[in-house]
Image (cartoon, helix red, strand yellow):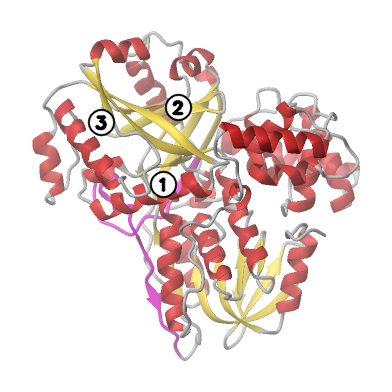
């Protein structure tokens, strides 16, 4: 057993140790907001338990555009404080998670010079509509403000404007209807679900008295006690001083189960598709196009690990358990992309993956989902005679601002406990971002030392470093049944030794956890049924699956990939 938490057995052991005791905080929901708060509280010496009914980071947090952005579009709705916070948090993540969060050059095609100014001013001053067209003057003003708000902890260049000729040269194939383009930097998160897990792991390492469990349910017992039940049926009685409901779009459901009915959430659905279209990926060249659709909504397309990620929709919806990317959304994406890139061979058969989720936005009567605030709040339900613990619900928020949101809530919890913050998370590295080599010279030194100590090739270590950060050394030094040369038949960028390490160390419970969240294998070009068969055998020493049980798990994963992701393996 290393200093890090490892297997499911360790997570259960921690809960067993806490059983029948009273702790400080129980967090229900292990998405990005819950995980961020868990880490922050653990760093302050607060004893916490975080649980999720599914896998860590498998809900709304897995259904984002995989961007860490300052919220350029929030300037239109006058949410200037949110833009200021988002740009700061984006810059901090680029510093604290450099293995996972990286700069993304973004280009906005512009189709007019002066349109949209009056509509934007109206929206800024309270009119319930969004600009239907955004001209060069409006975009220039917006990018200037964006640079201004993003100046704190600035790590990326400022914006620039491109002439029509420059834009057409840099993006051959884009519609000639443009008059200019704006270029600026935001960021992308390559492995969002891994970042969620890293936050939880950091919290567990910071406070050995805290615990985390996926595939677990929470139900009230009596007085201040809750029953936490794992998927194996084992249950634990935990007393708590406070509950944090971080269940995202399930917040109102969880509060009702705790005897505190609420109507906090009025979510909207966001869907994405992923295209295997090399011509488009080549044209993008690592950049994102952030473009205006016919209905005025902003769409995006960018190079995501060699594929083209396209998003997103924004439709009021309220059923997070059965959300999928629908046919009309696919038609919408393909139509809008074809308008932008008229000569690109865009078609439905290029889709290799799709996903959808419900944004946990606050309840709103806004007719246009785009006008619902992306800001966050944390309403508190005080204890009463039947429920002796208060409940804090984490409403709204966005991927980029999770750390700041967690800091706000953690400070309020500390104040209610009469305690003070002992460690800031502002400059605290996340997971494999700790001691990460940030420039070519330091990276070369790191790779040279790792090559000498592990025996793996420099190219392979560079790949592991990009994927795991400095935790790559633990992966490279893993001693198990396989070597790094043992590979899957199709998804060959992952070695069997690496996958075995993930199962052994990262609370992987199911095939879906491994294929969809601890790795990006579900998006690998060559992933096949033979790969799934091989992956299932890796679980045998940890789960004791028989051949029939392994096949059942394979069948379940295949059905999930088809039903939720349009992916046939």
* Residue 320 location (% of width, % of height): 49, 51
* Residue 245 location (% of width, % of height): 49, 68
Do the residues bearing badges 3 and 1 touch, measured as CB atoms within 8 Å? no
Indicate yes or no whether the magenta region holds residue 370: yes
Answer whether residue 559 is visible to the viewer in this image: no
Q: Residue at x 47, y 34 (%)?
A: 272
In the depicted structure, whether residue 555 falls above or below residue 290: below
Answer whether residue 266 is visible to the viewer in this image: yes
Q: Secondary structure at mark 2?
A: strand
Magenta-highlighted stretch: main secondary structure?
loop
Which numbered circle lies on residue 295? Answer: 3
Distance of mark 1 from mark 2, alpha carbons? 18 Å
In the depicted structure, whether residue 1 falls above or below residue 48: above
Q: Residue at x 49, y 46 (%)?
A: 95
Q: Secondary structure at mark 1?
A: helix
Which numbered circle lies on residue 302? Answer: 2
Quadrant placement of the N terminus: bottom right
Q: Earlier in the sequence, mark 1 or mark 2?
A: 1
In the depicted structure, whether residue 18 falls above or below residue 349: below
Distance of mark 3 from mark 1, alpha carbons? 28 Å
Q: Which residue is mark 1?
A: 90
Does residue 439 appear left or right of residue 75 in this picture? right
Q: Earlier in the sequence, mark 3 or mark 2?
A: 3
Distance of mark 3 from mark 2, alpha carbons? 21 Å
User: Closest to the observer: 534 or 334?
Assistant: 534
In the depicted structure, whether residue 259 falls above or below residue 134: below
- Give the label, 3 or 2, closer to the camera: 2
User: Closest to the observer: 211 or 233?
Assistant: 211
Query: Magenta segment range?
Result: 356-384
């Amino acid at each position: 057993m290393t200093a890090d938490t490892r297997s499911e057995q360790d997570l259960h052991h921690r809960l067993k140790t806490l059983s029948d005791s009273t702790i400080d905080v129980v967090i229900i929901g292990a998405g990005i907001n819950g995980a961020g708060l868990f880490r922050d509280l653990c760093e302050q010496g607060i004893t916490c338990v975080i649980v999720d009914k599914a896998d860590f980071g498998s809900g709304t947090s897995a259904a984002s555009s995989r961007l860490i952005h300052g919220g350029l579009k929030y300037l239109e709705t006058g949410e200037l404080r949110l833009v200021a916070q988002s740009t700061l948090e984006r810059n901090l993540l680029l510093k604290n998670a450099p293995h996972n969060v990286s700069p993304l050059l973004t280009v906005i095609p512009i189709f007019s010079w002066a349109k949209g100014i009056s509509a934007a001013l109206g929206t800024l001053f309270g009119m319930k509509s969004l600009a239907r067209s955004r001209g060069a003057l409006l975009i220039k003003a917006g990018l200037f403000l964006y640079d201004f708000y993003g100046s704190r902890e600035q790590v990326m260049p400022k914006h620039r404007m491109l002439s029509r000729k420059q834009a057409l040269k840099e993006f051959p194939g884009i519609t000639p209807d443009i008059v200019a383009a704006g270029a600026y930097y935001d960021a992308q998160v390559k492995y969002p679900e891994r970042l969620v897990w890293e936050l939880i792991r950091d919290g567990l390492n910071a406070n050995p008295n805290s615990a985390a469990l996926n595939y677990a349910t929470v139900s009230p017992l009596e007085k201040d006690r809750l029953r936490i039940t794992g998927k194996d049926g084992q249950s634990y009685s935990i007393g708590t001083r406070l509950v944090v409901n971080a269940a995202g779009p399930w917040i109102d459901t969880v509060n009702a189960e705790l005897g505190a009915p609420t109507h906090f959430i009025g979510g909207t659905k966001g869907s994405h598709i992923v295209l295997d279209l090399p011509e488009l990926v080549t044209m993008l060249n690592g950049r994102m196009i952030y473009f205006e659709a016919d209905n005025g909504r902003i769409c995006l397309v960018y190079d995501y690990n060699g594929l083209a990620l396209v998003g997103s929709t924004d439709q009021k919806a309220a059923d997070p358990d059965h959300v999928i990317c629908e046919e009309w959304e696919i038609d919408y994406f393909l139509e809008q992309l074809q308008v932008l890139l008229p000569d690109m061979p865009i078609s439905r058969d290029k889709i290799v993956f799709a996903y959808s989720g419900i944004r946990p936005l606050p309840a709103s009567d806004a007719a246009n989902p785009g006008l619902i605030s992306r800001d966050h709040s944390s309403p508190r339900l005080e204890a009463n005679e039947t429920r002796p613990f208060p409940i804090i619900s984490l409403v709204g928020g966005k991927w980029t601002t999770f750390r700041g949101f967690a800091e706000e809530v953690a400070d309020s919890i500390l104040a209610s406990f009469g305690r003070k913050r002992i460690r800031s998370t502002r400059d605290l590295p996340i997971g494999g971002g700790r001691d990460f080599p940030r420039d070519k010279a330091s990276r070369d030194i790191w790779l040279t030392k790792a090559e000498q100590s592990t025996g793996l090739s420099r190219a392979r270590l560079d790949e592991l470093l990009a994927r795991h950060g400095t935790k790559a050394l633990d992966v490279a030094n893993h001693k198990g049944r396989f070597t790094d040369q043992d590979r899957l038949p199709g998804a060959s960028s992952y070695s069997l030794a690496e996958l075995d390490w993930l199962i052994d160390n990262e609370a992987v419970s199911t095939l879906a956890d491994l294929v969809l969240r601890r790795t990006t294998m579900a998006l690998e070009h060559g992933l096949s049924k033979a790969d799934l068969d091989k992956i299932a055998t890796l679980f045998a020493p940890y789960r004791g699956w028989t051949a029939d049980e392994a096949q059942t798990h394979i069948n379940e994963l295949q059905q999930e990939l088809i039903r939720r992701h349009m992916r046939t393996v």
